[in-house]
């Protein structure tokens, strides 16, 4: 039973919805500035996202992966 099953909230500032996904901070930090997502001042090991914020994250991650594929083949 993980933290999401226990009902942890979203890590994004001013969001109190329950989380549906967890990501590593390093994966989140690659896309977060471009997506306009910000978490608190400290850098946790895991970032928890609600459905709405995960959708935004996934959209920008898809674009980043596409650019990397174009760049490196």
Image (cartoon, rainbow, N blue to C red):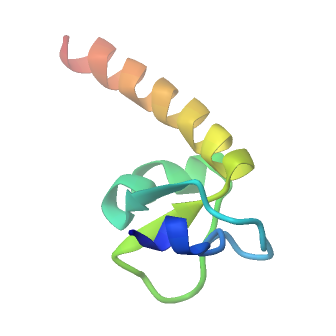
Q: State which quarter of the image contains the C terminus.
A: top left
Q: Is residue 47 above or below residue 27?
A: below
Locate residue 27, reporting x and y percent.
35, 53
Residue 4 in the figure: left or right of residue 2: right
Q: Pick out the residue farthest to the front.
A: 1
Residue in the image at 48% along x and 35% along y: 61
Residue in the image at 66% along x and 41% along y: 56
Q: Quadrant of residue 59?
A: top right
Locate residue 18, reporting x and y percent.
69, 65
Locate residue 71, reporting x and y percent.
27, 18
Residue 4 in the figure: left or right of residue 69: right
Q: Pick out the residue farthest to the bottom.
A: 42
| Nearer-the-camera pick, 43 or 3 | 3
Q: Is residue 6 above or below residue 51?
A: below
Residue in the image at 74% along x and 47% along y: 52
| Nearer-the-camera pick, 2 or 15 | 2
């Amino acid at each position: 039973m993980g933290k999401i099953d226990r009902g942890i909230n979203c890590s994004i500032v001013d969001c109190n919805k329950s989380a549906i996904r967890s990501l590593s901070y390093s994966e989140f930090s690659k896309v977060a500035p471009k997506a306009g997502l910000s978490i608190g001042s400290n850098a946790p090991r895991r970032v928890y996202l609600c459905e709405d914020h995960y959708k935004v994250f996934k959209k920008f991650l898809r674009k980043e992966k596409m650019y990397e594929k174009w760049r490196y083949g």
